[in-house]
Structure formats: structure tokens, C-alpha cells
Image (cartoon, rainbow, N blue to C red):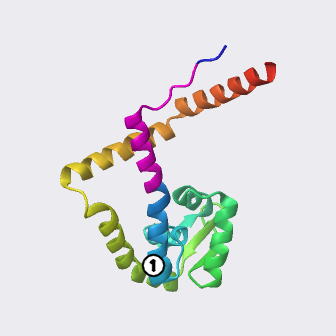
Amino acid sequence: MGRSPRWLTPTQLEAWQAVTLVLARLPTALEAQLQCDAQLSYIEYYALAGLSEQPNRAMRMSELAVLTNAELSRLSHLITRLEKRGYVRREPDPSDGRYTNAVLTEAGYEHVVAAAPGHVAMVRDLVFDGLDAAELHALRQIADRIIARIDDPARASDATGRASADSSKRKSE
């Protein structure tokens, strides 16, 4: 017989619903601004911005996939679109030719630099202008804690083990 679920308390449920609404609506609002002002999707902007911050404006595709939280195949399609627009090019990694780098072109750099002020203004307006210093500090601490729990390998293996055990238990019932 399995454990009964640990349901959310009413307060936790309200907080969770607010968080899920932010997770759904904030990227949509930011993407709308980027599409309107720079003809870029949210992920395209973050890929270009990530490249702009790297030495030589280049990054291995696999590392850029991690940065943008995209699967490599999705990132490859995105880079193809950005290549067609002249913002990025691919080239072998000079330190290890088995890898491919995405390299921000001068046109791509100019485009992301032009897009950044409008994007930052929207981020400030939607997120930071509504928070005081203590709330900003709390937001950072909360985000860091959640990310640490997501990235904790012990939690990941525990969750995998729990999922496997739950699956085995269902099969035997």
C-alpha cells in the first residue's frame, strides 16, 4: 500500500497558482515585446544575448542549448533560422573540431544590442519596478533555492527512483 499524497495547503496552492501564472504569462509578455520591437522570439533573443556575452561571441552549440534550456535539435533549428537572417554562423570549434560553435555575426551583435534596451525596459517594468529592495532580495533567494533543488543530483536520482518504484508498483497491482 502506497503513501497517500501530500496535498498542498490552501496557502501553498494559492502561491503555486500565482507562480504558474507568472511562468506562463511573463515569457509571453516578453516575447510580444521582442517580436514587436526586434522581430525576435524570446529564445532567439536569449541565444543572441548569450552569444554576445561570450569571448569572441562564440559558444559550443551544446553549451548554448544548456544556456537557453533548449534541446540540441530545437537549438539547431533556431540557429538555422538565425543563420538565414545573417545573425549567426556555425563553425568548427577551434579547440576540438568534433564540436560546432555558434558564432554571433556583426549583424547579429548589432541587432541584439539594438533590441536590448526595449527588452530591459520591459523586464524592469514587469518585474523589478514593482518590487522594493527587500522583495528583490527575497525573489533572488527564492529563485536560487528552487534552482538548487532542481539541479541537486540527489533529488534527481531520488525522483527517478520514486518514479520507477511507482511504475513497478502499478504494474504489480
Q: Which residue is mark 1?
A: 112
- Residue beneath the point at 56% across and 74% down: 103
Q: Does residue 60 appear to the left or right of 36 in the view shown?
A: right
At horizontal 41% and vertical 49% (from top left) the residue drawn is: 18
Q: Give x and y (percent) for residue 136.
A: 26, 53
Measuring from the top left, give residue 132's x and y in whole percent. 20, 55
- Classify 84 as above or below 77: below
- Tell me: residue 137, above or below residue 70: above
Residue 28 screen position, x and y as percent: 49, 66
Relative horizontal placement of residue 46, taking residue 116 as reference (left or right): right
Q: Is residue 135 above or below residue 76?
A: above
Q: Is residue 138 left or right of residue 149?
A: left
Q: Quadrant of residue 87?
A: bottom right
Whether residue 48 is in magenta: the answer is no
Q: Which residues are magenta?
A: 4-22
Q: Which amino acid type corresponds to the residue marked 1 in the rendered image?
A: Val
Q: Residue at x 47, y 50 (%)?
A: 20
